[in-house]
Image (cartoon, helix red, strand yellow):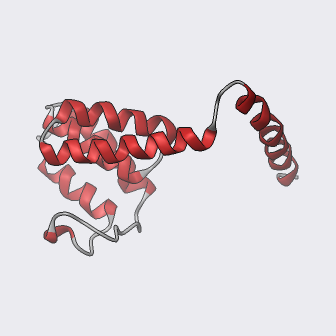
Amino acid sequence: MAARPLARAALALALLAPLLSACGHDPAADQAAAQLAYQRGFEAINDGDWLKAEQYLVQAKQAFPNDPYVLLNLGVVAQRLGRFAEARSYYQQVVDKAPDVVPRQVSDPQAAGKSLADLARDDLATLPSE
């Protein structure tokens, strides 16, 4: 029975795509823009521009609300901006949603081989107690 609602949803999306396209809404372009926003957010983190990083990462989160990379980096930004409860929430989401995701490439050699959840736990441990 569960397949029927999924099939209806897929059909609805298939029917909706041409309408959105006709209105100037291009899902592929939206996804590409979100990926670019994520990349720019990551670059802003590397530059230490936390507010700009947050701006870009929030844009990426709109398209990818459960992406553990976006969530982890939003946690880093929130922590750097002194918003520890928000950082804690982002880090915990990463622990819950991505226990086995291991990044292929990391900028910090100490992070090599660690899962995103491990990295989030490490960051959680650096937060001041509530």
User: Is residue 114 found left or right of 67 in the rendered image?
Assistant: left
Return the x and y of residue 28 as percentages of the image width and height. Answer: 60, 44
Of residues 50 and 39, the one nearer the viewer is 39
Quarter that holds the C terminus: top left
Q: Is residue 95 above or below residue 115?
A: above
Position of 88 with respect to 24 (left or right) is left
Q: Quadrant of residue 24?
A: top right
Q: Position of residue 21 (x, y in %)?
A: 71, 32
Residue at 84% of width from left, 54% of height from top?
3
Between residue 35 and residue 1, name the one nearer to us. 35
Q: Which residue is at 80% across, 46% downward?
A: 10
Res 122 quadrant in image = bottom left
Residue 65 shows in this picture: no
Q: Residue at x 82, y 38 (%)?
A: 12
Q: Is residue 62 above or below residue 91?
A: above
Quick check: 61 left or right of 127? right
Q: Where residue 88 appears, x then y in whole percent? A: 26, 41
Asked if residue 32 shows in the view, the reply is yes
